[in-house]
Amino acid sequence: MTTWDDLKVELRRLESDESRPLRSFPSPGVDDDRTPPFQIRLAPWATEVAADLHARFDDDVDLSVGALHYPDRTARNPDRSLRETPRTALDPLLEPDEVEVSLTEPVEVRSGYEADTKLELRNRRSAEVAIRTNGRVTARVVDPATGVTVGGFAGFQTAPLVVFRAAPGQSIVLPLLIGTASYDPALGYAIPPGHWAIEAVLDLEGDGPRRTPVFPITILG
């Protein structure tokens, strides 16, 4: 068997795994004489899967675990989801006396995994507020001591335009996705357990991007 034949067998096995270690990979249903290296992206928690694939297929697979390349733990950014932006150049903050945002509940998420929660937005303006999204807002994890972005969701998302609207004085709920992939090689492939924080950027029609306040979260082992 060729490397691609062997790898197809393994990809089919992993594709049926209920824990969903695969995030992006060449389709094992397409047999078109593919040649290595085969690009495979794994969940941030799936280091053991990555180690097995690396041991078996070596340089014939190009592996990423979360946002970082495996096994050298260097930053990968094929979908441009990671932004190295100085704090002084970040999007402006929401003004709480105009648009107030809060988490609807305390948030705990397991290291290497994602969690869905909600933001509550209250429009304190005299005019409607419209937030452009892809159906949800995606958080980024920040160091609560420095405010520096250290992780978040790593992967591709569909991009339909879904606009959430709040009339003056109205409160609405926005779906919020929290990912715990590490963007910092020193932290490993997933944000380690501990007390962290999140923020999100809301795309307001007419105003552009605005940052939410920073909210505490707990990442569990």
Image: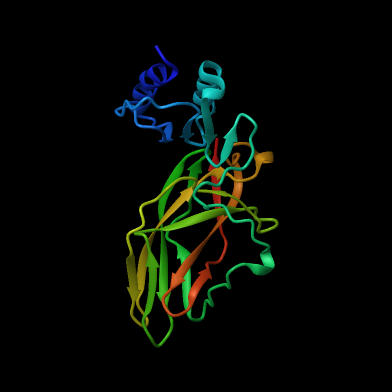
Q: Residue furthest front?
A: 33
Percent across and percent down for residue 123 are 41, 78
Could you tell me which quadrant the C terminus lies in? top right
145 displayed left or right of 43: right
**Quadrant in which residue 85 is drawn:** bottom right
Could you tell me which quadrant the N terminus lies in? top left
**Quadrant in which residue 125 is drawn:** bottom left
Q: Residue at x 57, y 72 (%)?
A: 93
Percent across and percent down for residue 28 are 34, 27
Q: Residue furthest bottom?
A: 126
Whether 195 is drawn above or below 190: the answer is below
Residue in front for this viewpoint, 111 or 187: 187
191 displayed left or right of 130: right
Q: Residue furthest top?
A: 1
**Quadrant in which residue 173 is drawn:** bottom left
| Colour scheme in use | rainbow
Percent across and percent down for residue 126 are 40, 88
94 displayed left or right of 204: right
Whether 27 is drawn above or below 116: the answer is above
Q: Residue at x 68, y 62 (%)?
A: 86
Q: Residue at x 33, y 80 (%)?
A: 167
Percent across and percent down for residue 63 are 53, 31
